[in-house]
Amino acid sequence: MTTAARAPIAAARRPGTLRPTVVVPGTGLASPQQAAPVARPQGATPANLTAPAMIGILLVAHAPLGEAFAAAARHVFGEVPRLAVIDVLPDAPTGPMIERVAACVEAVGDGDGVLVLTDLFGATPCNIAANVADSQTKVISGANLPMLLRAISYRREPLSVMAEKVVTGGSLGIVQVGSRAPQRQAVVPDGTRESLRSYHQQQQQQ
């Protein structure tokens, strides 16, 4: 990342200044919102002003799927902070895309960790995203909308817990609809170990 690109991120972390982070429309990159610094109340300490950790979320998918998922999430939650999108075009060069993914991870992570959701395992977006996977950046393929909504809902949990919730939510969101009546995302156990495990997981989440 260039020195110029690092400057806004560094400014957002300057002690005594609290700046929310937003997604820049049309760029897929997150940057600090240009707002006046929030004054620290007299007698307040950094500890009692520090917000709970919030895991950053990055969507890396075949264009225009990532932005479509993000738009659907905003439809449900309103504006979603620290959410970035990289929609990969068919002829996109791999090297610059890897650099762009790394820049987005740094921008939305802010030291709290990042969950990267990508659409198809083994495809170009997934292979690009795999380059940033480490202990603070989890990459999950097979993204669907239930996974993204679950990620937003559990982003204040530890990264490992959030990743597990996302994978479970993505699986439970796949339901064969056989009736016009409203249906819950339910798993009815058929006696096998796997179906019973899924059923009890679901009961624990309700």
Image (cartoon, rainbow, N blue to C red):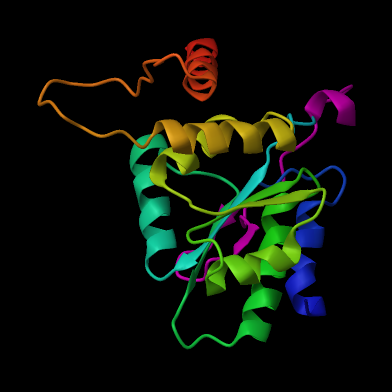
Q: Residue furthest left?
A: 180
Give the answer, above or below, for where 150 lies relative to 105.
Answer: above
Q: Does the rendering let one see residue 109?
A: yes
Q: Main secondary structure of the magenta part?
A: loop
Tag count:
0
Above or below for 21 versus 4: above
Residue 206 position (above or below residue 26) = above
Residue at 37 percent across and 68 percent down: it is: 64
- Residue at 73% x, 36% y: name it: 160
* Residue closer to the observer: 198 or 126: 198
Residue 115 spot, x, y in % from top left: 65, 48
Instruction: State the extent of the magenta-drawn residues as a range.
Output: 21-49
* Figure quadrant of residue 159: top right
Does residue 27 appear left or right of residue 109 in this picture?
left
Q: Find out whether residue 198 is within the magenta segment.
A: no
Left or right: where 125 falls relative to 114: left
Which residue occupies the foreground of this view, 46 or 6? 6
Instruction: Indicate the quadrant where residue 181 lies.
Output: top left
Residue 162, x across and y down, in percent = 64, 34
Q: Nearer the viewer, residue 51 or 205?
A: 205
Point out residue 146 in the picture as x, y percentages from the top left corner.
Answer: 42, 38
Q: Where does the N terminus fall, quadrant-wise?
A: bottom right
Across and down, in percent, residue 199 comes to 47, 16
Residue 149 seen in the current view: no
Q: Is residue 40 magenta?
A: yes
Q: Residue at x 18, y 21 (%)?
A: 182
